[in-house]
Image (cartoon, rainbow, N blue to C red):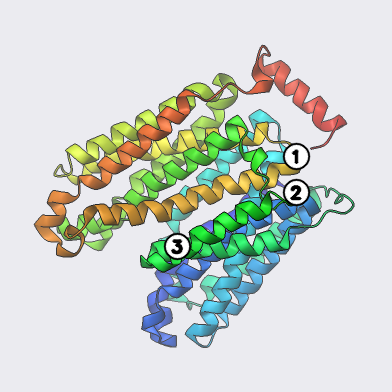
Amino acid sequence: MTAGLILGLCLAALEATVVATAMPRVIQELGGVALYSFPFALYLLMATVSGPIWGRSSDLYGRRRLYLAAVLLFLLGSALSGASGSMPMLIAARALQGLGGGGLQTLTFTLVGELYPLRQRARVQGWISGVWGFSALVGPLVGGLIVDHFSWRWVFYLNVPFGIAAMLLVGRGVPESAPGPGRRVDVQGAALFALGAGAFIYGLELESPVALILAALVMVGFAIFERRQPLPLIPFPALRRPFAFRGFLGNLLGGMAFFGMTAYIPLFAQVARGQSATIGGLLLSPMTVGWTVSSMLTARWLPRWGPRPLARWGPIAMIVGFGAWAMARQAPLPALGLSGLIIGAGMGIVMLALLVCAQEEAPREVLGVVTAMLLFARNIGGSMGAAVMGATLGPALSAGGEALRTAFWKVPALALVLSLGILLMGLGVPDLPSRKGMPLEELELAEGEASRAFPR
């Protein structure tokens, strides 16, 4: 079962980097260079917006059937992408694939939160975080090999057998919970949420004030509408719990700092430092490695020490790393890579701790939507961070050269300020309710007995 969950998530994680490598060959064959960014943008948009809808639906209708439906949509989108004869068809297929990918990511994390006791859950979540790091490192190589020796279409077709294997493993290993009588997803709320979140992401990416105003109005209407629903799409009281609230805030600020910074590091390396595109990409690798390794270590530390120290160590490491970038941006590239390693390590520590603890705190009936909202906050934060940091650079962004080299300190400095916000949030992190006065061995025994007597 665990192998099936990891295999399924690996497909979604590899997709972004593998497809990016294949797209130049796709353009050569299908044309439509003006539409180059749309297969990426629409996939990410659909995956981000649909995540909370998948999570809430799994709370109401059961997780296994929703997980299998998400994988099926992802594989259907993959097959249609590989068979595309034009760029519009590829864009539509990628949108369908993104819809499935949003469910695949959200429901994998949710199933882990539901099926495993604390120590095992932290370890499995650490493995899953490692999948993202592994995919970021090997994805471009795998995509290049497939495109050079076979065809770009096999970048998509190869998802199918592995996705079917994931469906079989999870379908046989995960028990299904029967939906409660009268439960029904809030369709009107889901439509409002999708419209508002989609307009917000669109407005950030294209710097459209009209789209941002529309997004604000729709989301205000969504909040008012949800307060009157007996089964709202997003039950706001669930997000006001201590770990859920801090997890949402921490993921939002962390996404802004980490992904906002990574959006401009390759540009800095190439334009301000005169390095190749390869070097610019390699400068991101230490951040990915730091996140991956620290997530796996945090999986061991969390059950032993609890969330309080980790919620402080992670932001402190990020502050040190971003501060080093701001003060030593003229330093040799290996020194900047070391700073990136520290940043990634801090991000991995705090993100895993917040996610696992929010799941430990959440009741089963809202576990899916709580998990989904934390992942949604991280993705939205990344879009916000890239937009805000681009605005911070101002004219230097288009001037390049020495102007960009001089002004770039503002990007890590802003990320440092955001990390300070995560640290302040971490200072108020409580201990896990189930840990108070209970040794780890007793806690795990109690969890095991409870899971057998009262499945979540």
| Residue located 43% across and 25% down the image | 312
Q: Mark 3 — residue? A: 213
Amino acid type, label 2:
Asp
Q: For this rendering, which residue is in front, 179 or 325?
A: 179
| Residue located 72% across and 16% down the image | 442
Q: CA distance from mark 1 to mark 2?
A: 8 Å
Residue 413 appears in the picture as rendered: yes
Picture coordinates of residue 197, whole percent (x, y): 53, 60
First in residue order: circle 1 vs circle 2: 2
Q: Look at discs 3 and 2 and give the one toward the viewer.
A: 3
Q: For the residue carrying disc 3, how many other residues have a C-alpha within 10 Å: few (<14), some (14-19), or many (20+)?
A: some
Q: CA distance from mark 1 to mark 3?
A: 35 Å
Amino acid type, label 3:
Ile
451 in relation to 130, above or below: above
Picture coordinates of residue 74, whole percent (x, y): 63, 67
Q: Residue furthest left?
A: 402
Q: Mark 1 — residue? A: 364
First in residue order: circle 3 vs circle 2: 2
Answer whether labels 1 and 2 touch (C-beta < 8 Å). Answer: yes
**Image check: 16 left or right of 323?**
right
| Residue located 84% across and 31% down the image | 452
Q: For this rendering, which residue is in front, 80 or 438?
A: 438
Q: Mark 2 — residue? A: 59
Picture coordinates of residue 282, whole percent (x, y): 30, 53
Q: For the residue carrying disc 2, how many other residues have a C-alpha within 10 Å: few (<14), some (14-19), or many (20+)?
A: many
